[in-house]
Image (cartoon, rainbow, N blue to C red):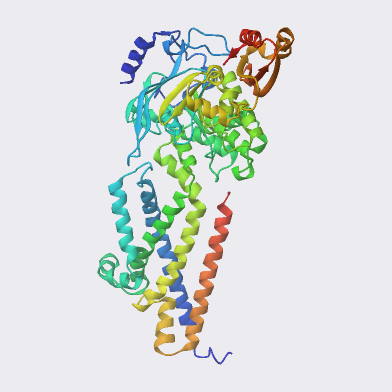
Amino acid sequence: MQVETAVQESRDTRIMPIRPRVGPLGAGPPSCEPDPLSQKSLSFWLIVDRGCANRATPGKPQETVQTTMIRIDNVHKRFAGGGGAALAGVDLTIARGEVFGVIGRSGAGKSTLLRLLNGLEKPSEGHVRFDGIDVATLGPADLRQLRRRVGMIFQNFGLLSSATVAQNVALPLKIAGTPRAAIAARVAELLDRVGLHDHATKYPAQLSGGQKQRVGIARALATGPDVLLCDEATSALDPETTRDVLALIAALNRDLGLTIVLITHEMDVVRQVCDRVAVLKAGQVVEAGPVADVVIDPQHAETRALLADAGDIGPGAHDFAGQVVHFTVHGAATTTPLISRIARETGADLTILDGRVGRLRDTAYAQLTLGIAGGNTAAALELLAQYGRVS
Amino acid sequence: MTDFFADVVWSDIALATVDTLIMVFGSLGLTVLIGLPLGLALFLTAPEQVWANRGLHGALAVAVNILRSLPFIILLIVLIPVTLALVGTSLGVAGAIVPLVAGAAPFFARLVETALREVDRNTIEAVQAMGATTRDLVLRALLPEALPGIIAAGTVTAIALVSYTAMAGAVGAGGLGDLAIRYGYQRFQTDVMVVTVALLIVLVQLVQMLGDRLVRHFSRR
C-alpha cells in the first residue's frame, strides 16, 4: 500500500531520487538509526512540484526545484453529531523546508487541518500525504512511526506537570525505545538548543510561559522530526515572548531544514516567520500564496479582515479634502525618501493619513494611506506608481 | 471521668478497632485494584478518547450507576448470597469485604474517571503525537498526571469505607460500628458509644491528613 502510494506520487510529481531514502517508515527501532538531524541531508528526494511554481517565495533564492513534504488533496472533515463540515474541500501543498502558515478565526477548521497531518484526526474524504504516504491508510504501528517524524507544539504547551523539564523532553525518546544513555545525551543537547539547560530539574509550574513553550519545542524535536506542527503555539504568550519563540522557530527552520506548519489567528505571527500562508474560512482555503503577496495585495475579504485586526489596514481618512490613495511599496524602494521628492517635483502636498511600515520576514514594506492636494496631483500619482502599487 | 468509662471493656475496643482497620484498608486495597482499571476504562471509552466506544462506555456506566444507586445498607443484604458463594460466610471481617468493595469500587472508579478528565487535553494529544501506544499514554502520562487526584479519590473512598464498615457492623461484620450498635445502642452503654465515636473521628482525621499529605507530595502544579 505504502509503496504503491509512493510510486504514484513519483509519477505525479516527477521524483528524482538522488540517494535512496535512509530508514523509511517502519524500518527498525529508532534507536538503531543514526542521529536524525545529521541524517537529514542523506534522506533527500528531489521533487519538481508544479503546485509551488506559480508564485515565488520572497526573500529566498527562487528555487525551481522543490520537494513536497505534505500534500492535502480535497480533504473534507465532518464530525459526528453534525454541526456542518469542519473542512470542506481543502487542497494544499507544503514544500520541504518551508514555513507554512494557516491563518483563520476560531472555528475556521485550522486545528482540525493541523491534526490531519499527524493522524490525530482522519479525513472524512480526500487524502493527506506525508512524504508520499497516505496518513489515513496507516495501521496503528506505522502511524506511531510516522508520528515520530512529526513534532507538535501546543497553545497550552501540553507538558506533563508531574515530570521535570528533562523528563518531559525525554518522554518521546522513552516511547521510541531509545537507550537510557542516549536519552540523557540527547536531552542535554536539546535543552541547550532551546536555552534551558539550567532548568532541567525544574517542573513546568516553575517556568514562565515562554520557557514552557521552549520545553515543548525541545520535546517536539527529540525524535529528530522532519516536520514541526505548531498549534497556536504563541497565542498564550505576551508579544515579546511571542517574538522570541517565533525567532526560535525560524532558527530551527533555517538551521535544521525543518518543515514547519503553523496555525494562528494572528497576522503578525504569519508576517514574522512564514514563507507562505493559506487563509482558512469556514473549512475552505479562500486565499493562499507567499506571505508578501497575501499581505500586500490581499484578494479576499477574510484576508483583509484579518489584516485589519492586526492593524495593517487603517480605518481610512474620510475627512481629508483632497485625493486619498492607498500606496504599497516593498523592497529597496521602501527606504527611498519618495514622498518629499514627489512633493518637490510636482508641487503637490502629500500627507500620510494612515500607514504601516514593517518587515515581512526578510522584505521591508510600507503600506500607506496618502492624502494628496494641490499642485500636479496626476503627476504625483504617476510618480508614486513608479515606486509601488497605487490603489 | 474515670468512673464514666469504668464499664468499658478496653480489650473489646482494641479488637474492634483492629477489625475496623482491617476492613477499611483491606477493602480499600481491593477497591483500588478493581476501581482504578474500571475508572480508566470509563475514561478511555468515553467519546473522543483513545478507546471511544459508545456501547462499552454505556454498559460500564450503567453497571457503576446500579451499584452506586443502592444505599449501602441494602447492598449489604442484597449481596449476602454472592458473599456466601465467594468467601463461604457473610459474617465477620471476611464476610464484610465483598459488600464493602462492591460498594466502594464503583464510587472510586467514578472519582478516578473525574481525576483523569482533569488531565489537560493538549497533554494527551502531545503524548499521542509522539507516537505513544495506549499503554504508554496510560502509564507515562495519564496516571502520573492524575496521581494527585487519584490519591485524593482514594482518601475520600477510605473515609466512605469507614462509614460503610460501621453499617456493616449492623449485619454482623464486627468492628467499631458493631460495638457501637450492640453496646451503645442496644444496651444503652453511652460510654462505649462515646469511645467508638471518638475512635472513628480520630481514624477519619488521620486518613484525611495522610491523604492530603500524599496529594501535596505528588502535586507539581
Residue A312 image position (x, y, % from top left): 60, 26
Residue occupying the point 36% across, 49% down = B41
> Along the horizontal axis of the image, is A49 left or right of A338?
left
> Along the horizontal axis of the image, is B199 left or right of A366?
left
User: B10 above or below B43?
Assistant: below
Picture quarter with the C terminus of chain A: top right
User: B25 above or below A375?
Assistant: below
Residue occupying the point 61% across, 17% down = A327
Which of the 4 image quadrants contains residue B82?
A: bottom left
| Viewer-side residue, B11 vs B24 | B24
Residue B167 image position (x, y, % from top left): 38, 75
| Viewer-side residue, A233 vs B7 | A233
Inspect this view and state whether residue A222 appears. Answer: no
Residue A158 image position (x, y, % from top left): 52, 39
Residue B18 image position (x, y, % from top left): 46, 73
Which of the 4 image quadrants contains residue A17?
A: top left
Inspect this view and state whether residue A85 appears. Answer: yes
| Residue at the farthest bottom position | B3
User: A50 above or below A104?
Assistant: above
Residue occupying the point 66% across, 24% down = A353
